[in-house]
Image (cartoon, rainbow, N blue to C red):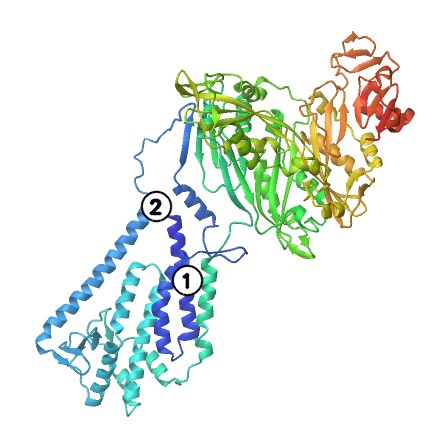
């Protein structure tokens, strides 16, 4: 219905536009043949133009209704739900006691259309019936003219003079002299000769089908006038006394019935005909030929369709629905909510988590939309959010931007006038925090991607990572406001270009939240799922079988498949990340790969690449148990290793350069100075709330450097919590130290990872990244009423939180290459003196700064050692 209404609107617009062209450029010109062709063709063009689609990559005016709220609401109402499955408690529908409404508004509209169309058809049929009666009444007095090939049929005064196809109906009751009779005959013969009746019938049919279109009636009236002009022109050419013919037209009076299917000598066009007769026969060809470019302009306006944004989703990868089904079924054991899963066509965002309203929550992950209902408690909501988090990456959208550049491809990136840091702060300050989610201890981040076009305007914003709680909609609404929408465009060789940009904000509770079992339910269940036996329906999955599954062609073929299809992620390459990704997956009875998961990952895109290749694996030879094909769980290590050549290549702005000798020589080296690293170590602090909540991880900052190596802008790419993000931003804003930049460009981009770790806690990924700075946090001071002491050997006295209250050792705190070694003693220090580049000893005021950062462990001083390698 929505598409049909849009088509009707566009065709109506086109026909009105065509009539406007006729009214302005052709109506008063004597180019009658051209005008007739125009009036006959343009209704068909008006119907055809909306059906033509010419894709273009630039913005243009659009008359379609597809961007209006009415169209979207109507489309959404009509789109059938592609429901994948429903799980959990059944939905209950409460209905009114009134009788249901059987007809919708579209049914009434269709009924009205059919009634009016039927009336017009009956009216046309009645006209044909009257014409038949007139013909039969005068048939016996009919004569046939061989010269002009027409039948002359008398009407005996029942109808005025008119023609219909090859029949000329003559009113013999009119008192006409021979000259007048001859002129009228010539007029009607011209109608017959030029086959004007076909034009009339053609427009009669259009007027009945498109009776609601006012333009069709205006065009029909214009065509009737044109027929008379054509016939009058012919008569005047043959008349000796041209002054008498206009008088004859005035003299003739309307008489009898007026059938809409005939060509009448006299109608209400008398004045128009006389004016046209007296016009100069000279044609203004410039004015007449304007119809051609204007028609092409209309074609461009209607048929050229701007592609939906500069970016296009070019790939959607969705996991096996059976796997998703098993996850949802497993969740019902402890989560009594109803879940409906359906596919949505052409999703706008990568993902979207709505706000919790009346116990209902909608979440879109890729092309799948999950509708949760009957959420009755905060614990249920926390579990649902955990379930949504576990479903991430089950359906993934990938987006490309054929008409836009990335930040690494432009000579000057797009930015607001005030700078990206100030813009980020102002945007963040305009948002209302999702208080409910933060109070419940739900942490996460929101990532937004958009285009900064050539005019510096933000367009096509989409959510890449959703936080939920209504925050996504807030961000999109803020980006649409003028105070945030206008930037300075990116430049490439001095010319403005479209550029892709993304930013992210992390959100975590500002106060310590007591985490319950609900917070870790899906995390723990996911970990245990790989250890327990799971089932697909009634089919058990075996860990050990008589004949294990085998890749077709054997191990060598499997190794070749991995070698040919695996690609090393650029981000991992640029940071020199290596490691082994351990996967677990199932080879089902048909030999197909199902349910691939990461047992132990490395990160930086290596896990996702390993999953992708395993998912796309060709069929295997299934495992056999007692002569039967069975489902078998497989464990697979994939080793990612960078070649020595690539290890020695220089990196710039987070991607690996082509390892050619020429480029290796010309590419700049970018690294922080010792002064910068020392400033960060001295200034940065581990927030108390994060230490209490044991929040750790990497804050990755994207830094824009000028040619002197000074930081111009900072963008936080990822952060475990908001307070860690704010701390990194605070320190980098205060920084005045330079980086080392060996190049000739005006600007450079580089990533700075700052790792926050808790003393005594193991790290999930001990691999150190390029330029990484490590900040070690010790347990915070005890809260009031919690200071109970336990004597410890050698190190000192600690409270229950592990903080040293009184030191009973004279050992200083050692920092080796920026990494704190809290357990290192002077008698265990084993460093070759020749490898030491510098040693710094902090006491007094400098020691107090270290004391604030590292706690009581630094009371006896801090020794910082930097080695040469």
> Residue 590 location, x and y as percent?
41, 27
| 744 lies left or right of 810 | left
Instruction: State the residue in front, 367 or 611.
Output: 611
Left or right of residue 238, residue 25 in this image: right
Q: Position of residue 165 (x, y in %)?
A: 21, 73
The residue most toward the left is 140
Identify the residue under disc 2.
105
Label 2 secondary element: helix
Give the quarter of the image for residue 446.
top right
| Left or right of 602, for residue 525 | left
Using the image, determine if residue 210 lies above or below residue 796: below
Residue occupying the point 34% across, 47% down: 106
Q: Is residue 408 above or below residue 850?
A: below
Badge 2 density bin: few <14, some 14–19, many ≥20, Cα 10 Å: few
**Which quadrant would residue 425 be assigned to in this image?**
top right
Q: Residue furthest bottom?
A: 240
Location of residue 256 with respect to 10 vertically, above or below: below
What is the spatial separation of the Cα atoms under label 2 and label 1, in whole angstroms? 26 Å
Please tell me which of labels 2 and 1 falls first in the chain: 1
User: Dot 1: few (<14), some (14–19), or many (≥20) neighbours within 10 Å?
Assistant: many
Can the viewer see residue 170? no
Q: Which residue is mark 1?
A: 14
Mark 1 element type: helix
Q: Quadrant of the C terminus?
A: top right
């Amino acid at each position: 219905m929505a598409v049909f209404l849009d088509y009707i609107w566009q065709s109506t617009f086109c026909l009105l536009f065509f009539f406007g062209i006729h009214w302005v450029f052709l109506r008063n010109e004597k180019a009658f043949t051209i005008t007739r062709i125009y009036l006959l063709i343009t209704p068909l063009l008006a119907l055809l133009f909306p059906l033509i689609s010419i894709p273009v990559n630039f913005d243009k005016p659009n008359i379609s209704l597809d961007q209006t709220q009415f169209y979207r609401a109507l489309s959404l109402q009509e789109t059938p739900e592609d429901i994948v499955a429903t799980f959990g408690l059944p939905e209950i529908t409460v209905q009114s006691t009134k009788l249901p409404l059987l007809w919708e508004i579209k049914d009434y509209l269709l009924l009205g259309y059919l009634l009016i169309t039927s009336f017009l058809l009956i009216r046309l049929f009645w006209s044909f019936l009257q014409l038949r009666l007139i013909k039969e009444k005068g048939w016996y007095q009919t004569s046939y003219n061989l010269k002009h090939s027409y039948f002359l049929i008398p009407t005996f005064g029942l109808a005025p003079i008119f023609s219909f196809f090859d029949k000329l109906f003559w009113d013999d009751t009119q008192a006409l002299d021979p000259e007048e009779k001859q002129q009228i005959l010539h007029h009607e013969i011209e109608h017959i000769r030029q086959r004007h009746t076909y034009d009339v019938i053609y427009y009669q049919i259009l007027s009945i089908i498109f009776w609601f279109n006012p333009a069709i009636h205006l065009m029909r009236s214009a065509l009737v006038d044109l027929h008379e002009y054509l016939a009058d022109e012919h008569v005047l050419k043959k008349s000796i006394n041209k002054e008498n013919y206009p008088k004859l037209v005035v003299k003739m009076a309307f008489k009898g019935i007026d059938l809409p299917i005939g060509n009448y000598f006299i109608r209400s066009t008398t004045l128009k005909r006389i004016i046209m007769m007296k016009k100069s026969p000279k044609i203004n060809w410039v004015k007449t030929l304007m119809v051609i470019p204007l028609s092409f302009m209309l074609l461009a306006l209607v048929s050229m369709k701007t592609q939906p944004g500069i970016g296009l989703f070019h790939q959607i990868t969705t996991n096996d629905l059976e796997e998703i089904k098993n996850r949802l079924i497993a969740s019902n054991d402890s989560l009594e909510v109803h879940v409906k899963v359906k596919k949505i066509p052409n999703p706008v965002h990568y993902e979207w988590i709505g706000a919790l309203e009346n116990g209902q929550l909608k979440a879109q992950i890729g092309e799948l939309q999950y509708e949760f209902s009957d959420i009755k408690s905060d614990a249920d909501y926390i579990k649902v959010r955990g379930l949504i988090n576990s479903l991430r990456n089950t359906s993934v959208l990938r987006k490309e931007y054929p008409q836009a550049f990335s930040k690494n491809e432009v000579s000057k990136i797009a930015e607001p006038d005030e700078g990206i840091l100030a813009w980020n702060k102002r945007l963040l300050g305009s948002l209302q925090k999702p208080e409910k989610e933060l109070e419940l201890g739900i942490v996460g981040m929101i990532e937004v991607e958009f285009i900064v076009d050539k005019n510096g305007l933000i367009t096509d914003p989409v959510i890449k990572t959703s936080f939920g709680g209504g925050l996504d909609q807030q961000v999109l609404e803020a980006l649409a406001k003028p105070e945030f929408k206008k930037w300075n465009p990116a430049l490439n060789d001095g010319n403005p270009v479209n550029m892709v940009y993304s930013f992210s904000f992390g959100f975590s509770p500002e106060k310590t939240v007591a985490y319950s079992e609900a917070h870790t339910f899906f995390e723990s269940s996911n970990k245990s799922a790989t250890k327990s036996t799971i089932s697909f329906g009634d089919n058990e999955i075996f860990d050990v079988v008589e004949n294990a599954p085998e890749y077709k062609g054997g191990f060598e073929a499997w190794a070749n498949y991995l070698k040919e299809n695996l690609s090393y992620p650029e981000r991992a390459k640029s940071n020199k990340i290596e490691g082994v990704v351990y996967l677990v997956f199932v080879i089902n009875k048909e030999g197909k790969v199902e349910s691939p998961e990461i047992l132990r990952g490395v990160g930086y895109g290596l896990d996702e690449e390993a999953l992708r290749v395993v998912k796309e694996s060709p069929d295997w030879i299934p495992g056999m148990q007692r002569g039967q094909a069975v489902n078998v769980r497989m464990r697979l290590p994939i080793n990612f290793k960078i070649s020595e050549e690539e290890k020695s290549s220089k990196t710039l702005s987070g991607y690996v350069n082509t390892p050619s000798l020429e480029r290796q020589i010309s590419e700049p080296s970018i690294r922080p100075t010792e002064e910068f690293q020392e400033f960060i170590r001295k200034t940065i602090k581990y927030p108390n709330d994060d230490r209490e909540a044991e929040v750790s991880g990497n804050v990755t900052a994207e830094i824009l450097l000028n040619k002197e190596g000074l930081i111009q802008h900072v963008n936080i790419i990822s952060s475990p919590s908001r307070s860690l993000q704010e701390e990194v931003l605070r320190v980098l804003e205060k920084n005045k130290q330079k980086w080392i930049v060996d190049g000739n460009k005006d600007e450079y981009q580089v990533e700075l990872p700052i790792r926050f770790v808790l003393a005594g806690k193991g790290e999930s990924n001990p691999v150190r990244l390029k330029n990484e700075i490590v900040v070690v946090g010790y347990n915070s001071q005890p809260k009031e009423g919690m200071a109970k002491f336990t004597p410890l050997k050698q190190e000192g006295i600690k409270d229950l939180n592990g903080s040293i209250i009184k030191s009973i050792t004279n050992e200083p705190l050692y920092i080796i290459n920026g990494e704190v070694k809290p357990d290192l003693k002077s008698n265990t220090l084993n460093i070759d003196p020749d490898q030491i580049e510098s040693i710094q000893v902090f006491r007094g005021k400098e020691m107090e700064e270290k004391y604030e950062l590292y706690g009581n462990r630094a009371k006896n001083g801090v020794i910082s050692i930097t080695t040469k390698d």
